[in-house]
Image: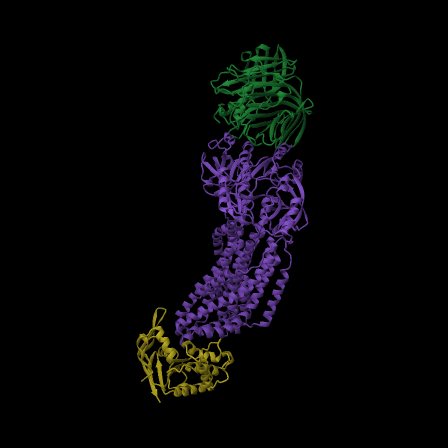
Chain colours: A green, B yellow, C purple
Amino acid sequence: MRTDLRALGALALGFFLPLSLSFAQFQPALPGYRFGFPRDYFNHPDYQTEWWYYTGNLQSLDGHKFGFELTFFRQGVSRDPKQNSAWGLRDIYFAHFALSDLTGKKFFHTERTNRAGPGIAGVSLSLQKIWNGNWSVAWADGEERLTAFADSFALSLALHSQKPPVIHGDNGVSQKSAGPGRGSHYFSETRLSSSGSLTIENRKYSVTGLAWMDHEFFTHQLEANQMGWDWFSIQLDDHTELMLFQIRRKDGSIDPFSAGTFVDAQGRAIHLRASDFQLSPAQDASAAETWSSPVTHARYPVRWQIHVARLNLTLLVTTPLPSQELATRSSFVPSYWEGAILLQGKKNSAAVAGSGYLEMTGYDRPFSVGEF
Amino acid sequence: MALVELRNVIKDYDSNGEKIRALGGVSLAIEPGEFVAIVGRSGCGKSTLLNLAGAMDFPTGGEVLIDGQITSAAGDSTLTELRREKVGFVFQSFQLLHTLSAVENVELPLLLAGRDSARQTAADRLSAVELAGLENRMPHQLSGGQMQRVGIARALVHSPKILLADEPTGNLDNTTGARIMELLVRLTRENQTATLMATHSPEAAAVADVVVTMRDGKVVDIKRK
Amino acid sequence: MSGRLKLFWRLMVKPLGREPVRTTLTIAAVALGVAVVLAMDLAGDAATGSFHSSLETLSGQQDFEITAAGGVPEEIVGKLAELPYDWRITPRIEGFALVADSKRALPLVGLDLIGVAGRIPLPLTKPEALDKIFDANQSSFEDLAKQDSVWVGQSLNKTCGDALELLVNDRALTFTVRGVYPDDAGTGSAILMDMAVAQAALGITGRVDRIFIRIPRGATNSLDEWQRRAQQVLPQGVQLRAAGASTDENRKMLAAFRWNLRLLSYIALIVGAFLIYNTISVSVVRRRAEIGIARAFGASRLQVLLAFLLEAAVIGGAGALLGVPLGRFLATSAVKLMGNTVNALYLSSRPGEITLDPTSAFLAFFTGLFVTLVSAWSPAREAATSAPVEAMARGRVEHSVRVNKTLALGGAAALALLAAAMSRLPPVGGKPAFGYCAALLLVAASVIAIPAFTDAIMRISSRIFSRLLGVEVLLASRSLAGSLRRTSTLVAALSTAVAMMTAVGIMVGSFRQTVVLWMASELPADLYLRPAGSPATDQHPTISLGFSDQLAKLPGVLAIQRLRGYEISYEGKPATLASVELDDSHIEHSSDFLSGSSAESVLAELREKNAVIVSEPFSYKHGVRRRDIIQLALGESRATFRVADVYYDYASERGMILMDRNVLLNYLPDPAPSNIAVFISPGANPANVRAEIERAADRASARILVFANSDLRMQAVQIFDRTFAITYALEAIAVFVAIMGVAGALLALVIDRRRELGLLRYLGASSGQLRKMILAEAGLLGLLSNIAGLCLGIFLSLILIFVINKQSFGWTIRLHWPIAVILSGTSLIWLATVLAGWYPARIAVRLNPVEVIHED
């Protein structure tokens, strides 16, 4: 279900909506899809929207803490077979890159948009590579190698997955609303041990840490009545992971298609329904609960309470750096908050802690399809 | 019949909007072969009188008759014609064209009038003023007296009936001046011209048949020999 | 100090007011001279700067540019984008399109609008321009996917949703305007498309025309290091240069052309200088007495010198000051004429905006002032050095110029010999500096010889013409000979103008005749086809392949010959690379080669080996001769070619390299031709064949133009004539200035000789005779100047043709005498000179002899 919300994100970027023109050229995500790897790490051009989403918490040897986000989007525009120029607009490739200097309390982010063009961006099974200019993920020697360069910051990481890919939802599809095809194919690598280096303002750090990868592809887009969403990826120190999201509707209610997945230490996934968990901003008067963006003036709740009754799990979510908003100057690309978080709580009465990433959208203005 | 006759001639000039009377009712007649000298101080109207007599100017009042023709009634071309046919001028500062040789200066009135055999006539005239052999000298190669002789030859080259001379000896020393006066008198007699000369030199006036004294634009005395 | 000022005022400035007409004429002469110099400077900037402005505005600040003959393989864009540097890669498609409704030719630019829109800030010098394109009110990304989307400048007067019909290559294509951006009053306008659309419109596949690289600001690495980084993904034939290098190349290519025009523009000023000299000389002569008085009262020589220089400065300053706005005004017309030349000979450019920058204005002003002071120096010095007594001595007679004729003629001969020697020296930095020195020396020689010449001619004229034409001519001749210095100055001024006219006339006439003869041998085909649109020399729009294939099969067509052109850069200079079909046995070739070899033997060599022939300007520019080996970057590779021969070419000043079509196709495989020559079968009716071709073009919806051989030649001659219009305009202005000078000088002469004129009236001259005399003086001045000018002009034309032209452009021009043109030109000038005497003659007639006879 996060699938669909992210789709909304992509659509927000892809202001080439309405998509009625091109819808028929793409296929919906239907139950019964059988994932196969490494094939499904790569491109699914039959589906209109697809993304690869890397986030993680890193730390240098001297204890300097960082968060990172590197995201590749592909948005199908046309499958007109008559287009034979390399510059023909079949897909638009977006990418976001952010580094959070959690110790230095600084947030860096940038974005880019390209078409495939003559090798400018793309996804290739044969090259084992997803790239947008000089931002890329390449599979080699059992590793996923992330590289990205921006004006004042850069990242180079090697990722090792410690668990097999986790497929979300039921029967290969993560349903988002009632009706066939209204969902996505969605899987994650929930525990990627990471090592490499990053550069911030001409200073290079050797880092290690844990990363998370999401990959979704689908065609059906979100309904128009949603305001935004809150999404959590959590890696606990008992070697388990948790993914949760909820969709906030414009009327203030929570969408019943909110969902999640728990991954146990052995890598087995348990699908969580909306009724299995509760996500709510923390009611703690002693600490700052919200952060106001000076750019978009959105107020983001930066302390959360998580309660998963089914797992007997309670967690308090805090962030070491409240200002992790990817604010954009463009009127087309929505701004959102995506940042590193810390977790503390109890699981079956035992103390548990962890780290993860939180994404919050729709706080500066409502998301509404077709308005852009 | 008088060749030049002035009948109560008045001449006014405009000077910065102010009217100045150069001649205030002058009457005068000159017969062929008669030599008339006009004496008086600078600005008494001598030159004005000469210009009127030479058809170079029109009177403001009265009449000027040249060989019987009233000048004020004539147009520019008629006056030019009159000068070409009937008038010769001699000037105080000789007024030779420095770019022309002696003979060329002399023949100029003939050429301007479109006469034939100008060169021969001019050479003859130069001989008549005793300058034979100096025909091709340029003015700056001549003495003052010689230049005035060239001026006289030029004034007479077209055999005018009227010879007008404005201080012809004014720029010459006494000896040379006297010889020029002799020449003028001789030529007046030979050619039977009506000669009118303005001068303030008593020596020059002494050779004239008639001496007219002028003051402030008026004739105050006429003496005949 | 105030006393000195008063003295200066009374002696020098006040007299200027006494002769308003003459002072005005002199000021006007300086003003025109300065105006022409400034106009040519401004127009040159505008006419040659526009290529820069229109395309550069749309690419913004860049550091490097990557180009290749026939285009850069587009994969390089991806390779560069993947390198681990935070640089910005901007690929660009460049072409030209003709807007169907306004017939306006505009650059057609293809940019990666997705990348542009996604990047912040936009890679533009004026980001707001492209930002507007994606203004939510105007258009959206959705439009990018459409194959008919274009964005245009405001100056096209289109609004969103309007249809825009463009003629691109030989196709008429209809687009939809998706957005409008501000384009600086149209000077920087271009038709903007997304890459894919531009490629489709221009028929390009797999290539882009240019890739820009912008390195990160604040990067510490050296430019060389960045260059090396980019170089690692570039194939051999692809060139990486500093951004703007090709614009610089174009500018350099135009430098010689601009230099020549600029020097030509100085003629009017030189003529003006003679007139200043004359004016100050007259002042000095007239005020001899005043100078004497001033000196007697203790004025120093320096003060007198300064007084006259100041007088000149007042005239020159006033003239130069007026010249600046006048120059700005003239530039508007000049830029049109100059634009024609640039388009015909060099590259397509739309004249840019004329901007009067303070530097140019000040430069022009001070040039005018400087020239004035230099020309006034000699008479002012003369005034200062003459002794007070001599100065006071009355004497209206201009102190006769003591011309030592032997010395003057000897000096003139020496200068002429020096000129001859200089004309044999090689160019300096590609510019015929010595050629210009030689020309200047010849002018100087003529100026020195002119007094003796004038004197001689006046002697003849006073003897012969006076007998034929009357005493007035005698008087005029004598008067002119009498004031020899004044006369000589005027003759020098006018004859210089006439000489330049004659020289340029002979050169252009010879050039024209050479081109006409050359075309007769170089254009053997019956019909010539090219895509409709603007025929600029650096553009090679193509004819669709399908249509050209049909052409050969049409009835009555014996053979076709396909030509293809590309713009390349050879050793830092723009050049045209062309291929021509040589394997059809039906076609007889008759090219003219420098070596004198037969066309068949040279072309046989071209067919067999990697050989090229190069044009004469190319050979000259690069020092490449027959049998030399040259290296060309073609597509992705570099290849060596033997120069089989050098051929005469007058079509363009850009160098040409020509090779066999099959050879070039190996390197640049695009088979679409730029031009097609059609040979008609013997016995076929040319009109029918032509109609057949036009029908076939209609069927293939190819927009092509068909020229009969004679049409093409006529068109070429028309273009040629348009090209040289500017030189005629410049000469006309110089002649005009000179004639103004004649009018002014005659006026001075009349005033100075009023006593003499009065005397003539006493001696029986009619007013008509006086008028005739003044007009005769004008006529004699004109005659003298025309004779002197023609003589000088003939020699100058030899320098122009064989030294300056050859060294600037490398063309071999065969000498030809355009007698009719020169005779009619000189007659016209003579007539104008006589007319210039009309006003002075009027003044002469109106003088009152009684008043002036005693003045002294």
Q: Position of residue C66 (x, y in %)?
A: 62, 39
The quadrant in which the N terminus of chain A is found is: top right
- Residue C205 position, x and y percent, is 58, 35
Inspect this view and state whether residue B206 appears: no
Residue that extends furthest to the bottom in the rendered view of this protein: B225
Does residue C426 appear left or right of residue A245 in this picture? right
Q: On the image, which quarter does residue A86 sit in? A: top right
Frontmost residue, C326 versus C563: C563
Q: Is residue C275 above or below residue C151?
A: below
Q: Nearer the viewer, residue A73 or C632?
A: C632
Camera-side residue of B219 and B70: B70
Instruction: Specify whether C228 is left or right of C128.
Output: right
Residue C535: x and y, percent? 52, 45
- Residue in the image at 57% along x and 67% along y: C448
> Does C778 sit above or below residue C124?
below
Front-most of residues C413 and A95: C413
Q: Residue furthest front?
A: C683
Q: Is residue C73 visible?
A: yes
The total number of labels drawn is 0
Locate residue C366, reporting x and y percent: 53, 56
Q: Looking at the image, is C439 positioned above or below residue C695?
A: below
